[in-house]
Amino acid sequence: MAKILLLAAAALALYVLLRRRFPGLKGDERKVSGKGVATLVRCPVCGVYFEEGTGFASKKGFVCSEACRSKADA
């Protein structure tokens, strides 16, 4: 019984340490940056998520890259 409790405590400690070290592993569509939580938006051309405000303007809105901008403007 003591072995099980020790293993459970070790697993919980590892979980807490990993969550503190990698806060972006929460499974949502946000990531932590130096300024706090950044909002991710989806590229209408390829579907990749990128940080809001870092995209390229096109006819379809903001896209993730120059390649997607040329596809959207074509």
Image (cartoon, grey):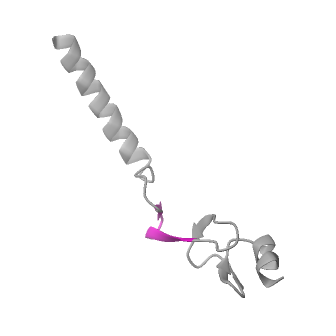
| Secondary structure mostly seen in the magenta stretch | strand
Residue 64, horizontal then vertical, whole percent: 68, 71
Looking at the rendering, the stretch of residues picked out in magenta corresponds to 30-41
What residue sits 35% from the left and 39% below the top? 17
What residue sits 76% from the left and 79% below the top? 72
Would residue 74 be found to the left or right of residue 26 on screen? right
29 versus 22 height, above or below: below
Which image quarter is the C terminus in?
bottom right
Would residue 9 be found to the left or right of residue 38 on screen? left
Would residue 43 be found to the left or right of residue 38 on screen? right
What residue sits 64% from the left and 66% below the top? 47
Q: Quadrant of residue 18?
A: top left
Residue 70, horizontal then vertical, whole percent: 82, 78
Would residue 9 be found to the left or right of residue 70 on screen? left
Q: Give the residue at the far left of this rendering.
A: 1
Q: Is residue 39 magenta?
A: yes
Given residues 69 and 14, the one toward you in this image is 69
Given residues 38 and 44, the one toward you in this image is 44
Given residues 39 and 60, the one toward you in this image is 60
Q: Is residue 54 magenta?
A: no
Which image quarter is the N terminus in?
top left
